[in-house]
Image (cartoon, rainbow, N blue to C red):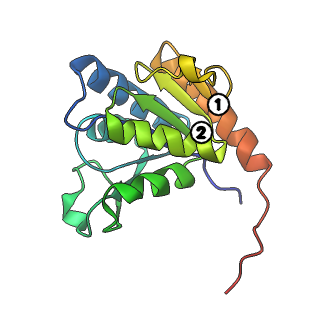
């Protein structure tokens, strides 16, 4: 049995715009309809909107929390992971996801984008930071115009990445 793709949705908590929240909810809904798992930071803003959309689409949501308290998760999170790692949990989100969709966001989102680029993981960018001056747009950082384009491309990328996975050999 193969596992489901895990699509990370990253974006602003308190800085999310109304448009960003609307886009995030649609992205979450579409991820659920593709039978993929939505992973996010589990808090408010884009994270809550995406998780709300995924629940509307009967999807499964994973919230990787900065605190050590599962009760901090937004009400749309099915599986809260209480890391007690503060912003270091951003790397956990990036490593967990097979592909990422960035919507709006501030410096926390920028750190997640940077972790993804550093790990060679593709980020589909929907109304978020620009990486044009760094020369990475179009490779690992792919600007997209709509929630549908973001999800279609992320799912396609995730399935390709999953097909290439091999066990690390780490056994303890």
161 over 171 or under it: above or below = above
Q: In the image, residue 88 lies at what x, y percent?
A: 39, 58
135 over 87 or under it: above or below = above
Query: What's the mark number on residue 57?
Result: none
Q: In the image, residue 60 lies at what x, y percent?
A: 43, 50
Q: Determine whether the residue tagged by mark 1 lies in a helix, strand or loop.
A: loop
Nearest the viewer among 125 and 113 is 113
x 22%, y 30%: residue: 15
The answer to whether residue 89 is seen in the rendering is: yes
Q: What separation in Å lies between label 2 and label 1 (alpha carbons)?
A: 6 Å
x 63%, y 21%: residue: 135
Q: Mark 2 points at which residue?
A: 117
Number of numbered tags placed on the structure image: 2
The mark that comes first in sequence, 2 or 1, is 2
At label 1, counting other C-alpha atoms closer than 10 Å, the crowd grade (few under 14, some 14-19, many 20 or more) is some
Is the C terminus in the top left, top right, bottom left or bottom right quadrant?
bottom right
Q: Which residue lies furthest to the front in this view?
A: 133
Q: Name the residue under label 1.
A: 140
Is the N terminus in the top left, top right, bottom left or bottom right quadrant?
bottom right
Q: Is residue 104 left or right of residue 3?
A: left
The answer to whether mark 2 and mark 1 are in CB contact below 8 A is: yes
Nearest the viewer among 141 and 101 is 141
x 63%, y 41%: residue: 121
């Amino acid at each position: 049995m193969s596992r489901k793709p895990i699509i990370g949705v990253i974006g602003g908590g308190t800085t999310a715009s109304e448009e960003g929240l609307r886009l995030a909810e649609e992205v979450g809904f579409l991820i659920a309809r593709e039978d993929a798992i939505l992973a996010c930071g589990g808090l408010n803003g884009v994270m809550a909107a995406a998780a709300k959309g995924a629940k509307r689409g009967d999807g499964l949501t994973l919230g990787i929390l900065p605190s050590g308290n599962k009760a901090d998760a937004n009400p749309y999170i099915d599986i809260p992971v209480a890391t007690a790692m503060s912003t270091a949990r951003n790397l956990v989100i990036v490593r967990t996801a097979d592909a990422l969709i960035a919507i709006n966001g501030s410096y926390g989102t920028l750190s997640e984008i940077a972790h993804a680029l550093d790990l060679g993981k593709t980020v589909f960018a929907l109304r978020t930071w620009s990486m044009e001056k760094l020369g990475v747009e179009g490779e690992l950082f792919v600007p997209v115009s709509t929630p549908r384009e973001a999800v279609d491309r992320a799912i396609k990328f995730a399935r390709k990445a999953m097909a290439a996975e091999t066990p690390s050999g780490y056994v303890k």
